[in-house]
Amino acid sequence: MGSYLPVTPRGLDRLLELQEVDLAIDRLLARRQVLESGEEVGRARQHLATTEAALAEQGLALDDVGRDQRRLEGDVDAFGQRISAEERRLFDGSVANPKELESIQAEVAGMRGRLARIEDQLLETMERREELEGRLKAFEAEAAEAQAALERSLGDSAGELATIQAGLDARTAERDAIRPAIDEDLLELYDDLRRQKKGVGAAALVDGVCQGCHQKLSAVELDRLKRADGVRRCDYCRRILVF
């Protein structure tokens, strides 16, 4: 059942207006607290640090692959030169012994096999390097964006704080203009309920539904509330109801 006082207090019809202003002030204060605590700037700094660490790790991986590629290229060049030298010995007439010629041919065949394996490794390494270079560019772009985001956050925070303060000044002036029009006992109840109910002490009753807790009141309860004078409150959440 709804509870009420025998006499309708002064200013009951302005309570929702006050509630709207108070909620706006609450939101502005919460936003100011976030900005003043540096949470957003802190998140931007953390994102930049994480991105830069990933970029550095990617750079080290690319350096390692580059060293491997240079080593393999050196091996390919060295084996190519050795193969060329041994093949010249096969055909320049400097070696006449058939067994030695056969040995040189076998050595050349072996070196060609090793050279083929090294060339395969070199190709894989070059593909890996190309992949890492692509990923490095992506990390560089992400790090640049993270740096820009941090700079925007630092700049925006100062501007937003000024905007918030202007909003607080305006809303506080509205609240100060409304409160004197409301009965002191009603204000005391409203303020107490706001502390208990997450900032919402008064709620509209729309189509039989309390907009504070979104519970639908029964037809009997609605009829009783409509006939009653004084402060009418929701049976479920106990907030002040305004028709």
Image (cartoon, rainbow, N blue to C red):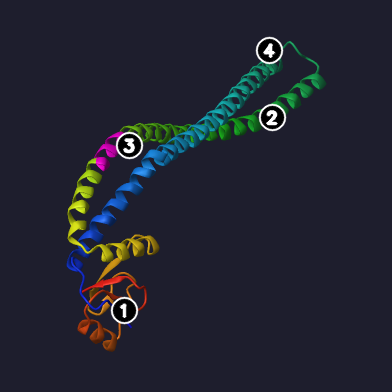
Left or right for 202, reference 50? left
For badge 3, the amino acid type reads Ser
Q: Amino acid at mark 1?
A: Ser
Quarter location, residue 18:
bottom left
Disc assigned to residue 157: 3
Which label belongs to residue 114? 2
Q: Is residue 175 left or right of residue 110?
A: left
C-alpha gap between disc 1 and disc 3: 46 Å
User: In terms of depth relative to the viewer, which is nearer, 188 or 47?
Assistant: 188
Q: Label 2, secondary structure: give it.
A: helix
Which amino acid does the dot numbered 2 rest on? Arg
Q: Secondary structure at mark 3?
A: helix
Q: Quadrant of residue 2?
A: bottom left
Segment colored magenta: 156-165
| Earlier residue among tags 1 and 3 | 1
Gap between marks 1 and 4 measured at Cα: 117 Å
- Identify the residue at horizontal 28%, vertical 39% (top origin): 160
Number of residues whose C-alpha sits closer than 10 Å to that of mark 4, classed few (under 14), some (14–19) or many (20 or more): few
Confirm whether the magenta stretch covers residue 240.
Answer: no
**Residue 153: horizontal and vertical position, in percent?**
35, 36
Mark 1 / mark 4, whichever is N-terminal:
1
List the residue tagged with mark 4: 92
